[in-house]
Each structure stands twice: as structure tokens, then as C-alpha cells.
Amino acid sequence: EELKTAGISAKAARTIGICVDHRRKNRSTESLQANVQRLKEYKSKLIIFPRKQSRSKQGDSEAAELAVAAQLQGPVLPIIAVKSETKARAITDEEHKISVFKSMRVARANARLVGIRAKRVR
């Protein structure tokens, strides 16, 4: 999905250093858009050298870019984590009184016993 949206074929992606997993699925549009943006940025910064200096094919970088090219060290495009906006707060008296563990156990038991209780009512 991401490669298709970014305009890169799977075969071409493997040749320029992008791992391709055909089983992968995006569960949110935000992550899809972020990954597509990263792929486009990667492709824009990429310099592709021709296999033979005498003959250059379509998709290879221009001679001016090849002359300026330098090997990068360290992480090329780091993933920037988005910080959560929630801040710490004091626990209220109501929250102190409620036992979450107990309420979860009751809810789980109710869900488990729905069929048996319905059978007894009949």
C-alpha cells in the first residue's frame, strides 16, 4: 500500500534498499501517510549510480549529483516519535474508591455466564 501510494514498485524498492513485506497491512491512515512521506523523502535524497560510467539508464542520477555524493554515517532517516499530550494528574477520591480489578473480573464473569443465565430464565 505504502509503496503504491509513494509511486514505487516492489521490484524497484528492493533494488534501492527498501525492505518489502507483502503481508504487512496498515491499520490507520495516519501511519500510512507518515510512511508514504518518509518513502518520498528517502527517494528524493537517494542518489543512484549507473552500473557503467559510460552508459546511464533512466532513473540514474545526473552527473552533477554524482560528483557531490557523500557516504552517510549513522541513521539515514530516523523515525521521530510523537509525544503524547496527556500530562500526569492527581488521582481523585472517586477513582480511589473504585476497584478496577474487581469490576473487570465481574464483567468477564458476566460475559462468560450469559448463555447459562439465559438458559436458567427460560
Image: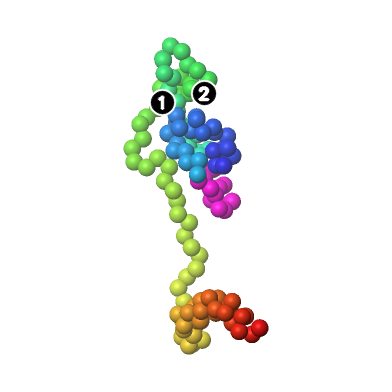
The residue nearer to you, when weighing 52 against 1, is 1
Residue 22 at x, y percent in the picture: 50, 41
Q: Which residue is mark 2?
A: 59
Mark 2 or 1 closer to N-term? 2
Residue 72 at x, y percent in the picture: 36, 35
Image disc number at residue 68:
1
Amino acid marked by disc 1? Val
Q: Is residue 48 left or right of residue 112?
A: left
Residue 71 at x, y percent in the picture: 35, 31
Q: Is residue 3 magenta?
A: no
Under tag 1, what secondary structure?
A: helix
Amino acid marked by disc 2? Gly
The relative height of residue 71 versus residue 24 in the rendered view (above or below) is above
| Cα–Cα span, label 2 and label 1 | 18 Å
Residue numbers of the magenta segment: 24-36
Image disc number at residue 92:
none
Pointer 2 local density, CA inside 10 Å: few below 14, some 14–19, many at least 20: few
Under tag 2, what secondary structure?
A: loop
Residue name at image x 57 percent, y 34 percent: 7
The rendered magenta stretch, by its main secondary structure, is classed as helix
